[in-house]
Amino acid sequence: MPIDFYHVPGSAPCRAVALAAAAVGVSLNAKPVNLMKGEQMKPEFLKMNPQHTVPTINDNGFILWESRPIMAYLAEQYGKNDSLYPKDPKKRAMVNLRLFFDACTLYKAFGDCYYPTIFAKAPMDQTKYEAVNTALSLLDKFLETDEYVAGKNMTIADLSLTATVSTLEVIDHDFSKFKNVSRWLAKMKATAPKYEECNNVGLKAFKAMVDELKKK
């Protein structure tokens, strides 16, 4: 039975979950949530997830939210092997390190910098813009010696970071000087299972929303 997947198509964390599901070969029953209309505040949604956030999954009664724990769960529960989320403690620690880097450093910097300009028409804060570049420079450093962000193989950390970095790309953040990031992102676009369906379609929706908000 497919897993119920409550999501916003343009959201990077939601796209990350979709990429992970595709990588492990599990089907998601997509249930879009319109945050603008407050659907996440409906009693039935709050009963399921009191934090009223997306992504949220319901796997035959097991409910989980926050993208990175969901990705880890999907890899462990449905992965044909442990390549996406290694069982070896040291390898897993590196994957977790990169997942936390995405959540607490890169994605946070992206949100702090761009969400005020997108949703509130605030002027670009140069300090926050540079924080994004600082995070990208760290990611570029991580990729100096390895093909993927946590070693020699693609993991859920790559999928999570792909969703974030591709969002920066689609809103025209300049990361041309980060050559390792550019190389890695091109490889992820070419090799991540169902990349077009799971990430690029949502990216186009996000870009369309950004362009529409600019007109208002």
Image (tube, helix red, strand yellow):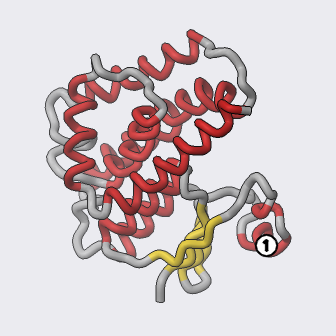
Within-10-Å neighbours for mark 1: few <14, some 14–19, many 20+ = few
Q: Is residue 37 left or right of residue 179?
A: right
Q: Position of residue 91 (x, y in %)?
A: 25, 50
Q: Which quadrant is the C terminus positioned in?
A: top right
Q: Which quadrant would residue 180 be assigned to in this image?
A: top left
Q: Position of residue 60 (x, y in %)?
A: 56, 86
Please tell me which residue is depicted at 79% across the width and 67% down the height of the picture. 46
Q: How many marks?
A: 1
Q: Is residue 13 left or right of residue 94?
A: right
Of the pair 82 and 167, the residue shown nearer to us:
167
Of the pair 207 and 133, the residue shown nearer to us:
207
Q: Which residue is mark 1?
A: 47
Please tell me which residue is depicted at 39% across the width and 43% down the height of the picture. 161
Q: Is residue 155 left or right of residue 122?
A: left
Amino acid type assigned to the residue bearing label 1 in the image: Lys
Q: Is residue 132 left or right of residue 189?
A: right
- The relative height of residue 31 versus residue 132 in the rendered view (above or below) is below
Of the pair 113 and 70, the residue shown nearer to us:
113
Q: Position of residue 18 (x, y in %)?
A: 43, 63
Q: Secondary structure at mark 1?
A: helix
Please tell me which residue is depicted at 38% across the width and 60% down the height of the picture. 19
Q: Which quadrant would residue 181 be assigned to in this image?
A: top left
Whether residue 97 can be seen here = no
Q: Residue furthest front?
A: 215
Please tell me which residue is depicted at 80% across the width and 75% down the height of the picture. 44
Whether residue 49 can be seen here = yes
Q: Position of residue 157 (x, y in %)?
A: 35, 48
Q: Residue furthest right?
A: 43
Q: Residue furthest top?
A: 126
